[in-house]
Amino acid sequence: MQPARIGVVIPTPLRAQLFAPADISRLNKLGAVSWTDAAAHLSVEEAIELLADCSIGLGSWGTPGPDARLLEGCPHLRLWVHAAGSVKRMFGPHLEGRNLVIASCAPAIAEDVAEITLAQLIIGLKRTLENAAANREGPSPRPSNSRTLASATVGVIGASHVGRRVVRNLLPFGPRILLYDPFISAEEAGEIGAERVADLLELCACSDAVTLHTPALPATRRLLGAAHFQAMPDDAVFVNAARGMCIDEEALIAELERGRLFAFLDVSEPEPAAPDSPLRHLPNVVYTSHIAGSPDCKIGRQAVDDIAAFLQGKSPLLPVSADMLERSA
């Protein structure tokens, strides 16, 4: 039996961020692997040349994917692994009748986003950054509003891959965890260690920290508005590592300017935020450059695991089908 032919269309600088040497070695042992040596993204025509005889394709952010042109030139493809998150752009009529599995590495990205979310919740509730700023001016006492996760109620919005991992990461610290998601039952929420809250306003009002992990969909545009931010208790911590469009940014800024909340924002709308945006200047905001789910070796590790599983007749970790698109990013 001939080894599987695998084509990697990820340019070398991005590949270095996504794949540890051990995972490159693992992939090379799974079949006959063709790697692009280009430092820039390939054109569709160049990708077709590299993938023409391949049964497995591996791409990432900005690379060609299995669209109509590429599949016409690469009729042997049976698996496409996207070493990134959303695969929505890959779907369409061109997939009808084709035996092609499309797999996303969103679970690996979720691990990174959940990791930084946990860190932000800990230092946010502890008032670490405010205390450090105060100590630059001279000796500062322990903040009176400092608390640990064990004494806090954390509201998680969205039982997405990230939201579920945030819940899992929080459990060892012992907070009360509230979860809002219209598609999860109370029983399922309980199984993962959270309490389902049916009303989003109630979650905001009852939480010492609120963290947002919903996909960017028409239904989630401005999911959090003025009433939700006003309902959050004084000194509440708000984390948004989802998308800027999911909140009413002006309403959040209004509460931040009052000094009531502290926010960790990895996203904004527009992105990046305007140079004169209050998000860049308010002392109670940590605004970062969409770094929570950036390229990382966990993604490459999952991609290789997915290919290994497929070659063994098993399923990749997250195969995506058209009926999943309505509720996914």
Image: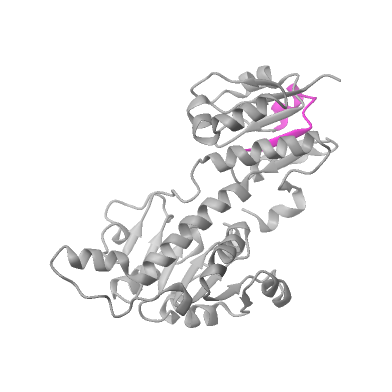
Is residue 144 visible in the rendered image? The answer is: yes
Task: Name the residue nearer the viewer: 328 or 28.
Answer: 28
Left/right of residue 140 with respect to residue 254 in the rendered view: left
Image: 313 above or below 146: above
Image: 311 above or below 268: above
Task: Name the residue nearer the viewer: 32 or 280.
Answer: 32
Is residue 244 visible in the rendered image? The answer is: no
Task: Name the residue nearer the viewer: 196 or 16.
Answer: 16
- Tell me the quarter of the image containing the N terminus: top right
The residue furthest left is 138
Query: Which quadrant of the view contains residue 32?
Result: top right
Q: Position of residue 180 (x, y in %)?
A: 60, 73
Left/right of residue 292 with respect to residue 10 in the rendered view: left
Q: Is residue 324 magenta?
A: no
Left/right of residue 239 with respect to residue 144 in the rendered view: right
Q: Is residue 77 magenta?
A: yes
The residue that appears at 47% across and 28% down in the rendered structure is 13
The residue that appears at 72% across and 74% down in the rendered structure is 185
Q: Position of residue 100 (x, y in %)?
A: 79, 36
Image: 6 above or below 119: above
**Magenta-tinted stretch:** 67-82
The residue that appears at 63% across and 70% down in the rendered structure is 181
Query: Which quadrant of the view contains residue 199?
Result: bottom right
Q: Position of residue 289 (x, y in %)?
A: 39, 49
Left/right of residue 52 with respect to residue 314 in the rendered view: left
